[in-house]
Amino acid sequence: MNHLSDSQPYDFSLVLGGPLYQFFIRARINTNTLGLLKRRVLVISLFTWLPLLLLSVFAGQSIDGAIKVPFFYDVDVHVRFLVALPLLLVAELVVHQRIRLIVLQFIDRGIVPDHARPQFEAIIGSAMRLRNSMIIEILLIVLVLTAGHFLWSSQLVLETATWYAALVKEQHLFTPAGYWYAYISIPIFQFLLLRWYFRIIIWVRFLWQVSRMDLHLVPTHPDRAAGLGFLGGSAAAFMPLLLAQGALLAGQIANHIFYEGDKLLDFKPEIVAVVILLLLLVLGPLCVFSPRLAQAKRQGLLEYGALASRYVDGFDQKWLRGGASLDEQFIGTGDIQSLNDLAGSFEVVKSMRPFPFDKTVLLQTAVAGLAPLLPLTLTMISLEDMVKRLLGILL
């Protein structure tokens, strides 16, 4: 079997395409292979963050104590554009490099049989055309400028005087820096984030279509997922995206804790909801194979159960009912080992997982989403007390 890295029809990427991707190439902050990552991160981050700094400094709202939230003390804006946004861009390279290799495993492992390869090629081609859609990206821009702006201005803006907006008669009046923030920086970030959600939709659609194919699944595969266990590795590819989402939530919560008197535990519903969302984004797509895994397990139990019955019946007839020849010795016979191997294979089938990932992957995904929130625990307990407790546990 030829390795498919040399076969263009199987070249899959969630990232290499779309109008914005082509624009970045023409702007010389991207290449056909996602090069120039540092330049891309620097240019986009500074374009969204640096004007805010300059305009707020010019207006005397960078560190001025006359307003409750000066620019330099706005945790959310710094985390959003200097941490989360770069992570969204880094995620493109990581996802491109890892997901394409995972897709190739369907062929390299023989899960997609030879007769189904044309259908597999067609599914990949359909996914790539959807990824390149100009209409979709235009719709995302419209969504950002309408619903995205409304959501941010109505739900996420602090109810106090800030560097980007003054509170006058319960209405927010944007400063010059605020206009850039609300109509340029925030829309750019929201567009990049929504484009990732769109890519997840493409990934779900691709996996669902593959799950409907005539796949060669082996219930006795040692990965306990009929050979599909490699799909669990896709969670690691999305780790930068998970960290970006967690950092975004941490920045928003930090502002509410520091400037509106809230407590970290007040945001338990939001934290739980975000963790569930991240699990659905990363591991949810893999669940489309659950019906196929359940079918493979049922079929495997029937087939290996029948095989086991025939074998143990023959074993019984040979060694317990006098069927063995007089010169054949029971000690040293391979029949015992074969019986044990058969029992092991049957146990593998019985222990098949309903999903192509295990609890470890589930835990790692949740931890990645929660990790950026860990510094906020210092708002509940001082660093000194935390160190003392850790020392008390260790010593």
Image (cartoon, rainbow, N blue to C red):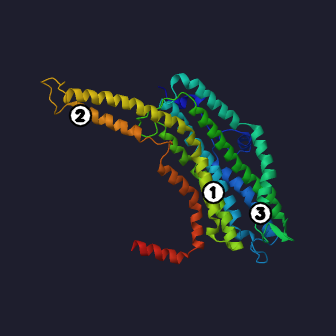
Q: Which mark is residue 303?
A: none
Please, what is the three-letter code of the amino acid marked with disc 2?
Answer: Ile
Question: Is 14 drawn above or below residue 63 in the view shown?
Answer: above
Q: Amino acid at mark 3?
A: Leu
Left or right: 25 with respect to 371?
right
Please name the residue shown 74% across and 74% down the image.
63
Q: Which residue is mark 1?
A: 273
Residue highlighted by disc 3: 52
Q: Residue at x 40, y 71 (%)?
A: 394
Mark closest to the chain's N terminus, 3 or 2: 3
Mark 3 to mark 1 CA distance (whole Å): 31 Å
Residue lying farthest front? 321
Q: Position of residue 311 (x, y in %)?
A: 30, 28
Q: Residue 120, relative to residue 41: is it above or below?
A: above
Residue pointed to by mark 2: 336
Any part of residue 29 in sight: no
Mark 2 falls on what kind of element?
A: helix
Q: Nearer the viewer, residue 311 or 390?
A: 311
Q: Earlier in the sequence, mark 3 or mark 1?
A: 3
In this rendering, would 320 be left or right of 159?
left
* Residue 214, percent from left and from top: 54, 27
Badge 1 or badge 2: first in the primary sequence: 1
